[in-house]
Image: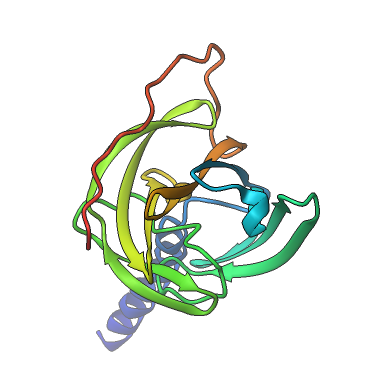
Amino acid sequence: MRTAVILGTIATVLLFLSIAPGFVRAQVGVEADDWIKYDAVTSGVDLSSINMPQWVKIEFLSVTGTAVTFRQTNHMSGGTEESSIRTIDPVTGEGNATFQILIPINSKAGDVIYVTINECNYTTVTLSGEGTGNYAGATRTLVYASLPQGETQVSYYWDKQTGVLLEIKLTQGSTSITYKATSTNIWQGSSTPLSFPTLDIPIEML
């Protein structure tokens, strides 16, 4: 009888160990060699006057559990490029990312998530709602949130299925800078692109 109990316990532990890694991986919707590129759109401000990137490319290098390592390349308005290796864990909030490139997959309105406010510092925010938008040649279901950072209001839009950032908009007074996903290998773009209206989703002040 005792032997049967021990064997049953071992079997349960082995079953848990075989299931647990899959559960962890399911929380992160990207894998090594995935990449996504964001182009800047401005209103009321010239990128060259503030030395901001014209585009940003994220290349995911490795995924260990929920910890993700990626290369971030910023193509600056002056023509130079800056590249750095960074980490982010969308489940724990840890890492040294400069913006929230990932959140857990299948997040929904009302969920509380971690958001990077600057390198190595993060806060929490509640997702305000869901919507759809056209990104990198495909219509994607998204979740969104907004939070103030000093005098700037930062609005985030993430892909619901993969958790990857689709768009980030920084608004200060009458000026704004938006970085929007324009190309990626994470999903397939439409072979016959359609014309979609500009994303227009109300953002709640949190």
Residue 199 drawn at (x, y percent): 36, 32
- Left or right of 145? Residue 117 is right
Query: Taking 92 as reference, is 164 above or below it?
Result: above
Specify the farthest residue to the bottom: 2
Question: Which residue shows up at 39% across the image and 52% down it?
Answer: 156
Coordinates of residue 92 in the picture (x, y in percent): 41, 74
Q: Nearer the viewer, residue 67 or 147?
A: 147
Could you say where residue 42 lies in the image, as x and y percent from the top left? 52, 42
Evaluate whether residue 138 shows in this view. Answer: yes
Left/right of residue 132 with respect to residue 126 in the rendered view: right
Q: Quadrant of residue 123?
A: bottom left
Residue that lies at the very extreme toward the right in this rendered image? 80
Is residue 57 among what the camera can see? no
User: In the displayed structure, would residue 68 be above or below residue 78?
Assistant: below
User: In which image quadrant can residue 41 be found?
Assistant: top right
Q: Position of residue 124 (x, y in %)?
A: 31, 71
Numbered circles on residues, count: 0
Of the pair 124 and 8, the residue shown nearer to us: 124
Q: How is the image coloured?
A: rainbow
Q: Quadrant of the N terminus?
A: bottom left
Q: Residue at x 25, y 48 (%)?
A: 203
User: Hey, which quadrant is residue 145 in on the image?
Assistant: bottom left
Residue shown at 75% from the left, 61% from the top: 83
Task: Please identify the residue farthest to the top as the structure is shown.
Answer: 192
- Residue under the image location 54 percent in, 51 percent down: 30
Is residue 65 shown above or below 157? below
Q: Choose between 196 and 193: the one closer to the eye.
A: 196
Quarter of the image with the C terminus is bottom left
